[in-house]
């Protein structure tokens, strides 16, 4: 027993070193945003997708591109626009004159890490094309199913301010994102650092400073560790109580589904792993509950008009539920 525990500690130490190297590489370019970077790593290990919301210029797209370069896998980027068609994203069948057969030409959604810029600018028909691939890691075109290769992760950005020419993401699609990450403006000292680094860079592109530190097989091994994380029964009940409260809260018109409960569990297991632990504690649940729940709940119209945010309600719920001992 002692030998197996020792072996586990060695493996987790090695894994923690990998996570630190990811943070260090992104830190060469990105100032701050530590929580966002941790959530991206967590989502990757939890096999989840991430919606990144923030005003233009806060490095949403750059961080996603840097994150993809750190991992030695395929990467593609799609700029969503109002005239984008589903076939522009998933691909289409093209007639081959030589063999008189239709051949499927994959779209940009066929990659390992897919960055979708301004996801809320495409119409509902194009949004619906993402439902199957985000949930089942496959695309069905002309009756044929095409599987995605692991790892598979969608990183999507959106601007919370500019709503002209945008389309509201349906709840069913929002529910397919493991996290919604909100990126704020940097603090004064962080912005000073950003400006100083840009000046010192002397024209060198940020992506050129980043070195890959992970391969697909490394990610698969890390996912295996995440699945083996120990979870106490009282922790499971704690998750259920938080999610149940969203359905009974008078401030909310729509509460979270059981998929949210599972998302908090899986995210907490992966987050514990990147912290170098093989067990979940209540603090993991608290840290994961906000990004998991904020896009899965809907405020009542009256409270929305009063300017109350979903984050405020989630924080109240977390503070209300007794922490397990």
Image: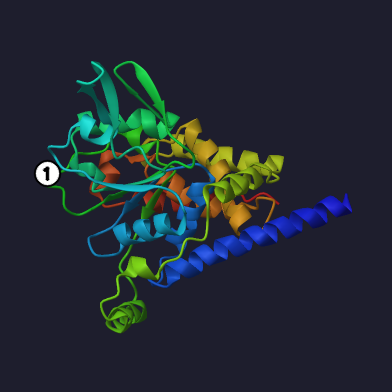
Which residue corresponds to mark 1? Answer: 165
Whole-percent x, y for residue 106 in the image: 30, 33
**Residue at the image point whose x is 48% and y is 42% from the top:** 151
Residue 13 left/right relative to 193:
right
Q: Would you place residue 169 above or below residue 324 in this image?
A: above
Report helix, strand or loop for mark 1.
Answer: loop
Q: Is residue 2 above or below residue 119?
A: below
Q: Quadrant of residue 168?
A: top left
Q: Position of residue 202 (x, y in %)?
A: 27, 81
- Tell me which residue sits at (88%, 54%) in the image: 2
Residue 206 sits above or below residue 107 on the image: below
User: Residue 35 or 105: which is nearer the viewer?
Assistant: 105
Q: Residue at x 33, y 80 (%)?
A: 197
In the picture, measured across the screen, residue 296 lies left or right of residue 46, that is left
Q: Is residue 226 visible?
A: yes
Q: Position of residue 178 (x, y in %)?
A: 44, 43
Residues 230 and 37: in front is 37
How many residues crowd mark 1 within 10 Å: few (<14), some (14–19), many (20+)? few
């Amino acid at each position: 027993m002692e030998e197996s525990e020792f072996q586990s500690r060695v493996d987790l130490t090695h894994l923690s070193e990998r996570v630190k190297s990811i943070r260090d590489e992104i830190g060469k370019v990105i100032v701050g945003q530590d929580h966002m970077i941790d959530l991206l790593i967590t989502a990757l290990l939890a096999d989840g997708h991430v919606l990144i919301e923030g005003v233009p210029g806060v490095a949403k797209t750059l961080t996603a591109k840097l994150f993809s370069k750190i991992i030695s896998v395929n990467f593609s980027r799609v700029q969503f626009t109002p005239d984008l068609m589903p076939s522009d994203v998933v691909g289409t069948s093209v007639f081959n004159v030589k063999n008189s057969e239709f051949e499927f030409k994959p779209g940009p959604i066929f990659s390992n890490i897919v960055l979708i810029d301004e996801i809320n600018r495409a119409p509902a028909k194009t949004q619906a094309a993402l439902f199957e691939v985000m949930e089942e890691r496959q695309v069905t075109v002309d009756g044929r199913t095409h599987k995605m290769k692991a790892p598979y992760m969608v990183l999507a950005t959106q601007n919370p301010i500019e709503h002209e020419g945008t389309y509201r993401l349906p709840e069913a699609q929002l529910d397919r994102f493991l996290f919604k990450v909100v990126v704020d403006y940097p603090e004064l000292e962080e912005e000073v650092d950003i400006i100083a680094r840009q000046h010192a860079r002397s024209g060198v592109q940020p992506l050129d400073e980043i070195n890959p530190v992970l391969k697909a097989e490394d990610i698969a091994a890390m996912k295996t560790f995440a699945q083996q994380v120990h979870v106490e029964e009282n922790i499971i009940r704690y998750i259920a109580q938080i999610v149940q409260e969203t359905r009974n809260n008078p401030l909310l018109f729509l509460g979270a589904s059981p998929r949210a409960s599972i998302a908090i569990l899986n995210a907490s297991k992966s987050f514990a792993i990147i912290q170098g632990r093989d067990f979940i504690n209540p603090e993991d649940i608290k840290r994961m509950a906000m990004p998991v729940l904020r896009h899965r709940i809907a405020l009542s119209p009256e409270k929305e008009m009063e300017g109350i945010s979903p984050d405020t309600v989630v924080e109240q719920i977390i503070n209300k539920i007794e922490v397990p001992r």
